[in-house]
Amino acid sequence: AQKVTQAQTEISVVEKEDVTLDCVYETRDTTYYLFWYKQPPSGELVFLIRRNSFDEQNEISGRYSWNFQKSTSSFNFTITASQVVDSAVYFCALSEADSNYQLIWGAGTKLIIKP
Amino acid sequence: DSGVTQTPKHLITATGQRVTLRCSPRSGDLSVYWYQQSLDQGLQFLIQYYNGEERAKGNILERFSAQQFPDLHSELNLSSLELGDSALYFCASSVGGSDYNEQFFGPGTRLTVL
């Protein structure tokens, strides 16, 4: 079974729309970390956020926000008022003690923002 | 700019050949990770080094090997290359030895095996 599931392979929205990228994870550890990375067309992976399992507070950074819900094992990422520059592949990843804290990556969601 | 450098940016070679990819981590980072990203396999973790020693191994083929040198730069050696080895190879670095530290990625080396 996949430990990190990004069920949305590709999402396409028009600029200025809000969009949510889903991430569902699976772990038996009580201590774990969740990450989001962005891979724009240029190719380089960019770190966006890290969240540990003890901190369920939602995070907002400008137009980006993250909703961490342990009850549903989800760590969703919302972009508000999307812009063309947000077009990228977004990866969710899990780091857990059971896997020696090795990052377990989701398959990624390709986000296309149309002008 | 993440501060992680990788050379070369592009590499084109033939089947059966051997290549070396090079990575310099961010200043102060002790861990280096290598990843392979291909269209059909997604992002695959290959290997991690921490302060010169191998820390973790992922889906790395026996034809592939890596090392981290005393100045902390790392090299990934790919030998007996096959068409299927064509991919984007990323290096990442982090300050600590565990993956719960955020990793900073280099721009990648695009390898094409003809």
Image: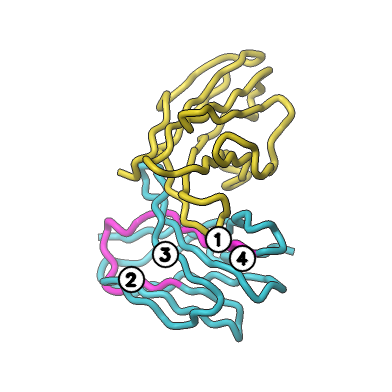
Chain colours: A cyan, B yellow
Badge 3 crowding class, 10 Å Cα cut-off, few under 14, some 14 to 19, many 20 or more, is some
**Quarter of the image with the C terminus of chain A in it:** bottom left
Q: Secondary structure at mark 2?
A: strand
Region rendered in magenta: A77-96
Which residue occupies 54% across, 70% down?
A23
Marks 1/4 same chain:
yes
What residue is disc 4 on?
Answer: A5
What residue is disc 3 on?
Answer: A49
Q: Secondary structure at mark 4?
A: strand
Asked where in the image residue B10 lies, by quadrant, the reply is: top left
What amino acid type is highlighted by mark number 2? Answer: Tyr
What residue is disc 1 on?
Answer: A93
Q: Secondary structure at mark 1?
A: strand
Residue B104 is a magenta residue = no
* B26 to the left or right of B113: left
Badge 1 or badge 2: first in the primary sequence: 2
From the viewer's perspective, is residue A73 above or below residue B109? below
